Amino acid sequence: MICRRSLLFSGLWGLVLSSLPLADAHAQLFETKAAQAFMIDAETGTVLFSKDADKSIQPGSLAKLMTMEVVFDAVKSGRLSLDDTFVVSENAWRTGGAPSGTSTMFAKIKSTLRLEDLIQGVTVQAANDGCIVIAEGMSGSEANFAQQMSERARTLGLANSVFVNATGLPADGQKTTVRDLTLLAVHIWRNYPDFYRYYGQVDFTWNKITQRNRNPLLAMDIGADGLAVGASEQSGFGIVGSASQRGKRVIAAMSGLPGDKERAEEARKLLEWGLRAFDKTELFAQGETVGEAEVFGGAQSTVPLKAKGAVDIFLPISNRDKLKARIVYEGPLKAPVEEGQPVGTLRIWIGDTLSQETPLFAAQTVEIGSLPDRALDAAKELAIGWLR
């Protein structure tokens, strides 16, 4: 049985109520022309906007975010150094270099490049030759590297992403979602600050050729500093953008737009809305009881629940009545219950969007009750069982 307790919040405080639908719960707080879109607050993980976020799309050059994550992880762990060198094969030159007519850093065939230069070629110029050179140098072939990308995606919890190549060039079976792309971008921002800065680099010169960063958001004066653009025939134009203002950072992914102008404008509007339309709110202080769970056969019938730390969320400034929270746990719990034992999850919705999930833990120990206590609980459970 799944036990659910509903919490309806007004401002900073909450009241325990029965399950009540929110008025106008299915109305979106923001509208976009993108077919798919997903945005979160980077600090708290609050989902600020979601539209068809789990629909499979072809990533195009957005796949390069996963390519770079594999590289960043290898450098951070010491398996690679920024001074390591890689040779440009004929395949890399022909498939992703000057003859390909695609995004390239114009590396010459059989030339040798430092890894740091290749990273900048990919993050700034979306260089396909740079991706293939790295893939062949790290894994022997691009196919082997793509398999490593997919395995790494599983490790990071990106359950709906499969990669067939390192570039994002059209390939059967290559897929992702805007949710996965957003979560990947947040992971890169959090875990690789020394490398994340490359995504905000306005240009890069290689082989005496200077190319500007392909991300249109960087020139819009909205605090944007990343991350990538892409396009595919099947999924249209897409983008993963990140912007920060006044200590607040939002990261979003969009897909299914008809052209680069619409892509730039819709991404700008979504990021600016995310930065301006939400305020950080503390729902529960550190150590504060969030709710309680029923206990079967214990010295007491309930146990208080709390999170590991404070529970913060970004709430819409003008639509706070659209917030609803619910504690979900498998219950009743069976005694004994140990303090700190994982019990359930606090799920928070803004409108019809599941915005945040926070693990909850037992705030105290509940020992096994006396024989009369256990007999009374058994009688209650039997009666409830018949009612179910």
Image (cartoon, rainbow, N blue to C red):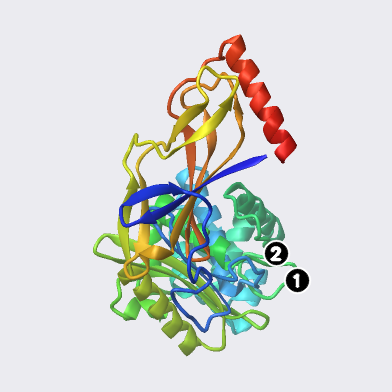
Residue 85 x %, y % = 51, 56
Mark 2: amino acid: Val
The answer to whether the residue labelled 1 contacts the one labelled 2, judged by CB atoms less than 8 Å apart, is yes
Q: Residue at x 41, y 56 (%)?
A: 189
Give the quadrant of residue 266.
Answer: bottom left
Q: Which residue is mark 2?
A: 164
* Secondary-structure class at tag 2: loop
- Taking the spot 39% from the left edge, 53% from the top edge, the residue there is 44
> Quadrant location of the C terminus?
top right
Q: How far across and how far down the image is residue 51, in percent?
A: 55, 72
Q: Is residue 172 visible?
A: yes
The amino acid beneath tag 1 is: Asp
Q: In this figure, which residue is indicated by the disc labeled 1?
A: 172
| Nearer to me, 257 or 294 | 294
In terms of image quadrants, where is residue 336?
Answer: top right
Q: Nearer the viewer, residue 291 or 20?
A: 20
On screen, residue 2 versus residue 47, left or right, reads right
Instruction: Residue 350: give its label.
Output: none
